Image (tube, helix red, strand yellow):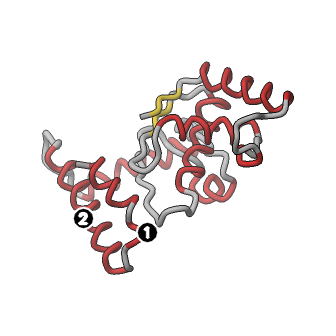
Amino acid sequence: QMLALSWEAGKAADLDTEQVQALQDKIRGELDDMAYRGLAQPVPHAKAVLSETEANLEARARGEIVTLPTGRKGFDGRWGGLEPGDFMVVAAFSSVGKTSLLCNILLHAAVQHGIACAIFSGEVVGDVLMRDMQRILGGIDYWQWPDGKFPKEVAERWRETGDRLAKAELYID
């Protein structure tokens, strides 16, 4: 269901504002339904969650909760990076940089920090995601050579970035 919804979201650029809002509400509803269907115990009272929040803040202050920097200074400065178990859904109109943002964060985590990461997209197929990550990691302006015939030094950098990506714990669907 989520893949079908993400496909709809990918086509959202052709929708007006009210239609996009309705689609976002539909996605939120599906996520809520999935979350509640999977619960094996009652939803905790706010009091229990508040005490857990307090304990987590104290652990963070002691340096016991390690966050993963995303490599995005604005995000890391505001939220301190990603915490273990974070799950995010990034939704926006087409061609605003969602995939590039996620590829940058994944590259930072998988290549720089050796963290296992996975990505799936309802808009972009796996080989295009890989090409984008190679382009980003290698600092290669892929579109300068639409025929794929890179100059020798660029081809070598392309292969090197491919080797680095092959060694990373990176899963692409």
Considering depth in this image, is 66 or 170 the residue closer to the camera? 170
The residue singled out by tag 2 in the image is 26
- The Cα–Cα distance between marks 2 and 1, rounded to whole angstroms, is 16 Å
Q: Residue at x 52, y 28 (%)?
A: 170
Residue 27 at x, y = what percent? 28, 60
The crowd level at tag 2 (other Cα within 10 Å; few <14, some 14-19, many 20+) is few
Alpha-carbon neighbours of circle 1 within 10 Å: few (<14), some, or many (≥20)?
some
Residue 10, position in %: x, y? Answer: 40, 58
The one of 93 and 68 positioned closer to us in this rendering: 93
Read off the residue under disc 1: 13
Circles 2 and 1: CB atoms closer than 8 Å: no
Q: Residue placed at 61% from the left, 37% from the top? A: 131
Determine whether, in the image, residue 101 is placed left or right of residue 30: right
Give the vertical position of 90 relative to 158 (above or below).
below
Q: What is the tally of numbered marks visible in this picture?
A: 2
Q: Quadrant of the C terminus?
A: top left
Question: For the point 22% across and 48% down, which residue is it?
Answer: 1
Q: Position of residue 45 (x, y in %)?
A: 21, 56
Instruction: Give percent across and percent down for residue 41.
Output: 13, 42
Task: Look at the picture and state if 30 lies above or below 19.
Answer: above
Identified by mark 2, the residue type is Lys
- Secondary-structure class at tag 2: helix
State the residue at coordinates (64%, 29%): 111
Q: Residue type at mark 1: give it.
A: Ala
Q: Specify the quadrant of the image occupied by residue 152.
A: top right
Mark 2 vs 1, N-terminal side = 1
* Horizontal arrangement in the rendering, residue 168 relative to residue 42 (left or right): right
In this rendering, the answer to whether 151 lies above or below 16 is: above
* Element on which disc 1 rests: helix
Q: Is residue 117 left or right of residue 113?
A: left
Mark 2 vs mark 1: in front: 1
